[in-house]
Image (tube, helix red, strand yellow):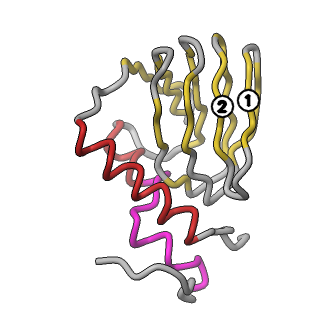
Amino acid sequence: MSTLQINPKYHDFVDAIEAKMNDVGCDEFEMSDFFCGGMYVRTIFIPAGSYLTSKIHKFEHTFFIAEGNITIFTEDGGEETLEAPYLGITTPGTRRFARCNTNTIWTTHHRVEGHTAEEVEKEIIMTRIEHLKLQEGAICRGSELE
């Protein structure tokens, strides 16, 4: 089992962005999901001009951009623009902050044990506190939370 790579400063930065987004009141994006043979597939429609953040992913999984163009602001302060069609891999510990340049359709694919979206969320997503604890039980020094 590999150790998750976590960048506490980046997560603090994304937390601050999420707080600002919550202050101005952001709409939920249109989403659909389904289960198939131990896989959970979730598709989100992101309107052009939107900014968004992702949750922290526990496990490696694939994603596919079927339509659109989106810029990801990377942990090292850079930018990476992805354009459909695009197939990528999300690594454990990933959390994204992005700007959607055109209407975008983004689909993720996860191997799961759960049978409901709520069960899957608990299985594949870290809480903000959990990300400080590496799989071996060590504490990742960095940000102080709750």
Q: Is residue 33 magenta?
A: no
State which region is magenta: 123-136
Residue drawn where x is 47% and y is 79% of the image: 143
Where residue 137 appears, as percent x and y from the top left, is 54, 86
**Spatial distance from mark 1 to mark 2, Cα to Cα?**
4 Å
Q: Relative to 138, is 21 above or below?
A: above
Q: Secondary structure at mark 2?
A: strand
| Quadrant of the image containing the N terminus | bottom right
Q: Is residue 138 above or below residue 119?
A: below
Q: Residue at x 39, y 72 (%)?
A: 129
Q: Is residue 17 above or below residue 129?
A: above
Residue at image location 34% in from the left, 37% down from the top: 116
Residue pointed to by mark 2: 71
Q: Amino acid at mark 1?
A: Thr
Q: Is residue 6 left or right of residue 139?
A: right
In magenta segment, residue 133: yes
Q: Determine the image quadrant of residue 84.
A: top right
Between residue 140 and residue 119, name the one nearer to us: 140
Marks 1/2 in contact by CB < 8 Å: the verdict is yes
**Circle 1 is placed at which residue position?**
81
- Could you tell which of marks 1 and 2 lies nearer the N-terminus? 2
Q: Nearer the viewer, residue 137 or 18?
A: 18
Left or right of 138? Residue 130 is: left
* Quadrant containing the C terminus in the rendered view: bottom left
For the image, the number of numbered tags is: 2
- Circle 2: is it few (<14), some (14-19), or many (20+) Cα within 10 Å? some
Q: Label 2 is placed on what type of residue?
A: Thr
Label 1 SS: strand
